[in-house]
Amino acid sequence: MTKSNSEKPQKTDVKVSLIGGHRLQGATLHERTVTASLLGGADIDLTDIDIPDGAELRITKLSLIGGVSLKVRRDVRVEVHGLRLGGVKDDGPTQPGGPTVRIDAWGLIGGVSVVRP
């Protein structure tokens, strides 16, 4: 993941499946990722990448049933937006500054769980 400047447009990854979730590794993601499935969540591991301070990595998850399991370093701030039946579990930093991962989770059933090893 690299931080974009104003001259270079951001790249977007798109992952689509009807049944079954997606397993995403940080090294294979760009600054924006969209994952869509009818049934199935997203298992995302971002512990192996260096997100620069001030950068924002955006992940949009669309599904009828399925949540998001996100693994990040302790210094990464996570913002969760969207509409879903299910809660958000995150014990991480909430103050502005530093690297940020924004999750836009849209679905009927499924929460967002953030794990910090």
Image (cartoon, rainbow, N blue to C red):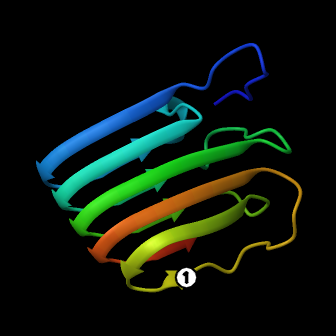
Image spot of residue 113 (x, y percent): 49, 74
Of 40 and 104, the residue lying toward us: 104
Of 100 and 84, the residue lying toward us: 84
Q: Quadrant of the N terminus?
A: top right
Q: Is residue 8 left or right of residue 103?
A: right
> Residue, x 45% and y 52% (percent of image)?
60
> Residue, x 21% and y 54% (percent of image)?
37
- Vertical side of 3 occupied by 15: above or below: below
Q: Residue 67, located in which quarter of the rendered image?
A: bottom left
> Residue, x 69% and y 27% (percent of image)?
2
Of 81 and 69, the residue lying toward us: 81
- Vertical side of 79 occupied by 43: above or below: above
Q: Is residue 32 left or right of residue 53?
A: left
Q: Dot 1 corresponds to which residue?
A: 89
Q: Residue furthest top?
A: 7
- Vertical side of 81 occupied by 57: above or below: above
Q: Is residue 117 visible?
A: no
Q: Residue 107, located in which quarter of the rendered image?
A: bottom left
Q: Quadrant of the C terminus?
A: bottom right
Residue type at mark 1 is Lys
Image spot of residue 33 (x, y percent): 46, 40
Q: Is residue 100 visible?
A: yes
